Image (tube, grey):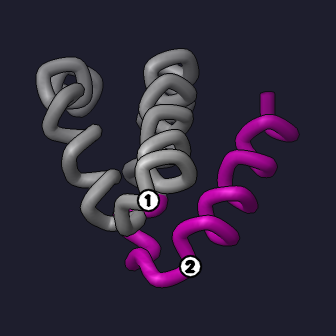
Amino acid sequence: MAVQDFFINQVLKWKMKDVPEEQREQIAMLFKKNPELMKKISEEIDRRVKKGGEPQMKASMEVMKKYRTELAELLR
C-alpha cells in the first residue's frame, strides 16, 4: 500500500503543481478512501478538457460540484 501512496502523491505533485501542498494532501487522502470515485472524477475532468475544450479549472470545478455530496461524505 505504501508504494501506491507514493505514486498517488507523485502524480498529484506532477498534475497539480500549482495547488498548495495542504490541498494536495487532502486530495491524496480522498484517493485513498475511495479510489473509484476519484478515478471517475478525474476521467470526467479529462474528458471535458480534451473533448469539450473547457479550461482545466472550470472543468474541475463543474465536476466537483456534480460530486459534492460524495466528496463531502469522504471528508467526514
Task: Say what secondary structure mark 2 lies in.
Answer: loop
Magenta stretch, residue numbers: 1-24
Residue 73, horizontal then vertical, whole percent: 19, 20
Above or below 74: residue 14? below
Kindly identify the residue that appears in the image at 86 percent across and 40 percent down. Answer: 3
Q: Position of residue 54 (x, y in %)?
A: 36, 60
Q: Could you tell me the amino acid type at mark 1? A: Gly
Residue drawn at the location 47% of the way across and 83% of the way down? 18
Q: Is 15 within the magenta?
A: yes
22 on left or right of 74:
right
Label 1 or label 2, whichever lies nearer to me, is 1
Q: Residue at point 14% right, 38% down?
A: 65
Q: Residue furthest right?
A: 3
Q: Earlier in the sequence, mark 1 or mark 2?
A: 2
Q: Residues within 10 Å of mark 2 (few under 14, many from 20)?
A: few
Distance between mark 1 and mark 2 Cα atoms:
21 Å
Q: Quadrant of residue 17?
A: bottom right
Q: Secondary structure at mark 1?
A: loop
Residue 28 horizontal side relative to residue 59, left or right: right
Q: Quadrant of the C terminus?
A: top left
**Residue 13 vertical position relative to residue 33 in the rendered view, above or below:** below
According to the image, label 2 marks what residue?
17
Which of 55 and 31 lies nearest the eye of the viewer?
Answer: 55
Toward the viewer: 9 or 49? 49
Q: Which numbered disc covers residue 53?
A: 1
The question of residue 37 being in magenta is answered with no
Q: Amino acid at mark 2?
A: Lys
User: Residue 51, image x and y in percent?
Assistant: 52, 46
